[in-house]
Amino acid sequence: MAPRNTEADTPRSEVLRLAPEAALTLESGATIAPLQIAYQTYGRLDAARANAVLICHALTGDQHVANIHPVTGKPGWWTSMVGPGRPIDTDRFFVICANVIGGCMGSSGPASTDPATGEPYGTAFPVVTISDMVRAQARLVDHLGIETLLAVVGGSMGGMQVLAWASLFPERVFAAMPIASAAKHTAQNIAFHEVGRQAVMADPDWRRGRYMLEGTRPVKGLSVARMAAHITYLSEPALQRKFGRKLQDRDAPTFSFDADFQVESYLRHQGITFVERFDANSYLYLTRAMDYFDLAADNGGSLAAAFRGTGTRFCLISFTSDWLFPTADSRQIVHALNAAGASVSFVEIESDKGHDAFLLEEPNLFATASGFLDAAARARGVAEAGR
């Protein structure tokens, strides 16, 4: 039998375990009980409980935003943004990041053990949505004794969660910063996700989602899914600048199907390293959650209705070379917020790094985030760092 993902049940992070009677009811009508949420915190909650910032992670992220990752041994996925003196300053803010439900790093998901059978859920785990993820996070915020979050921040799928937070719990979100995101997934993005899911499910080792029980792992399918997705996170100029048509450790083509080009070797490396830390079934569940996200459809077909009467202040950020979540998606949200009478600012950042720009060194992103969060903190009376 293939080894269990020990992080799924006993993660190396803080854990909230709720009793079976505190079941989480999902949009589908199914329930998760008992519910487990794995999370990390950084900094200290102030006496007024006014300085909490919730970070929502993207598709393949997790709760390890600013600490050494327990599986890979590498720094957290957003150390450029989160930490002492960073835009999300842990000397000033109490930062929370939770693994989403459906994930594989300790929150309830398909790799978790089903208490009814003693075996991993696999595809018996119920399908979850972005709103389900947010309602689970709200349970965690309740547990931490926080009534209103100073800010909710996230990029990509994390940005979808930010928007859902602001729509579902406007009274609990003082400020919201969705980055490189959208209010719905486009047909093209759903198509990319379906290619990835089919790659996983076509792997003979997937075993209809029962690979843990049958001693296999669909590493080839998941690796291909990651390779295809990773292309969408980049831009053509960035790929051309970094790789062009340069060959990989050779002077001439081999006239074979080896990785002749550096870009091929790079993608294969991305696929191989990804399968070491991520569960294949979780990939299916989280991509499907993104596909189902449509905030306007959830509000009678009106995106403005999702934010009507909100007192939350918003800052939306997009990148010029992001073709996965282009600027037009952010502008649509801005227009809806304007129609709803919300306080909103918007910044389009010039960058050739594609969708992944929000994870990289982007000075204009840092300046925008710092300015917005500082203004929100001052408006809420949160002291500056060191005071």
Image (spheres, rainbow, N blue to C red):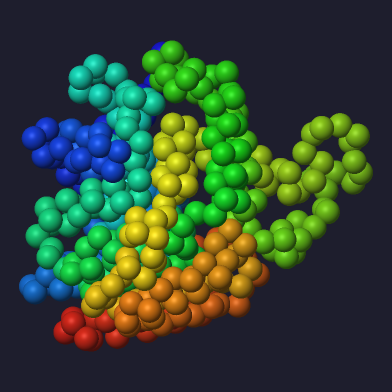
Residue at image position (29%, 19%) is: 119
User: Which of the two residues, 338 or 158, is positioned nearer the viewer here?
Assistant: 338
Looking at the image, residue 264 sits to the left or right of residue 179; the answer is right
Which x, y percent locates residue 13? 26, 45
Q: Is residue 73 left or right of residue 23?
A: right
Q: Quadrant of residue 24?
A: top left
Q: Is residue 193 visible?
A: yes
The quarter of the rendered structure image containing the N terminus is top left
Q: At 67% across and 61% down in the image, what residue appears?
A: 235
Question: For this view, does 263 lie left or right of residue 376?
Answer: right
Q: Quadrant of residue 386?
A: bottom left
Q: Residue at x 86, y 32 (%)?
A: 256
Residue 101, given in percent of the width and then of the height, sits at 31, 42
Camera sees residue 374: no
Residue nearest the observer in this picture, 58 or 46: 58
Where residue 47 sits: x, y (%)? Answer: 7, 73
Judging depth in this view, the residue of 247 and 36 nearest the camera is 36
Q: Is residue 280 above or below residue 244?
A: above
Q: Is residue 231 left or right of residue 314?
A: right
Q: Nearer the viewer, residue 348 or 265?
A: 348
- Can you say which quadrant of the picture contains the C terminus? bottom left
Up the image or down, 243 lies above or below 317; here it is above
